[in-house]
Image (cartoon, rainbow, N blue to C red):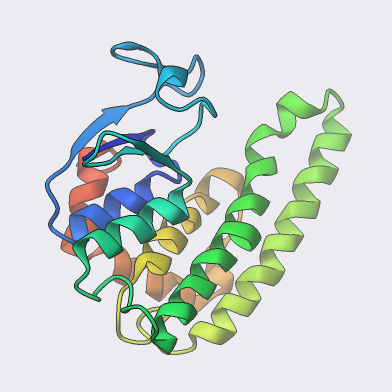
Amino acid sequence: MKLYYSPGACSLAPHIVMAELNMVYELESVNLTNKTITSGDYKHINMKGCVPALKMENGEILTEGAIISQYLADYKNDGTMLAKFGTSDRFRTLEWTNFVATEIHKNFSPLFGTEKMFKSTETQNDVKNFYKNVLTDKFNFLAEKLGQNNYLMGNDFTIADAYLFTCLTWTKYVGIDMTLWSNLNTYMKRVSERPAVIKAMKEEGLIK
């Protein structure tokens, strides 16, 4: 399998999943500014022009990070990163994954593109403050639900954690102070120390 990624982007989540599952995989970096890869136009691979994209074993291209992570976990089918079909834990993990996609990831997106969307500095700041306040509410919810658990599902690291960790690494780029949530800080440290997470981040050049 080959994962098309951009360093530190949401594609880091399925990258972590592949590393956690000890899968054999290839990586190809995407220039998101001009939508290119080493072989040329990335849109020939993924018409959406965004990451991640996964070239599956059969040669087909799968997109959307949350679905790619689910596919990878089901492909391995050992129940570690995503519980087996029909179990409550499976649906709870997917519930968390969907929450991260719709309530965390998407509320970060405007913070990275404000300058392109609005000419007025005042408007840019208003938009940034709005979405920072939205994320603050979401982080309050996460902190309460996480409590003293190791991971979102308790003691088991799942595809939802790979996705949440990826999104929370963006706080340092948008000026969100994570010291307000001590258990989320502890959670981030715990995840960052997992061997597979270290491996994926090194492969993307995010850490040495």
Give how far across and how far down residue 39 sits, in percent: 29, 11
Give how far across and how far down residue 137 sits, in percent: 71, 70
Which residue is situated farthest in the top direction here?
Answer: 40
Which residue is situated farthest in the front direction here?
Answer: 58
**Residue at figure coordinates x 51%, y 26% from the top left:** 49
Give how far across and how far down residue 12 sits, in percent: 36, 47
Quarter of the figure with the N terminus: top left
Between 37 and 189, the one nearer to me in the picture: 37
Give how far across and how far down residue 95 sits, in percent: 53, 74
Residue 45 falls in image quadrant: top left
Between 17 and 43, the one nearer to me in the picture: 43
Left or right of residue 111: residue 121:
right
Quarter of the figure with the C terminus: top left
**Residue at figure coordinates x 31%, y 79% from the top left:** 84
**Residue at figure coordinates x 36%, y 65% from the top left:** 159
Left or right of residue 40: residue 197:
left
Q: Is residue 33 above or below residue 2?
A: above
Between 31 and 185, the one nearer to me in the picture: 31
**Residue at figure coordinates x 49%, y 55% from the top left:** 167
Count of picture labels: 0
Between 177 and 152, the one nearer to me in the picture: 152
Q: Is residue 110 above or below residue 76?
A: above
Left or right of residue 182: residue 113:
right
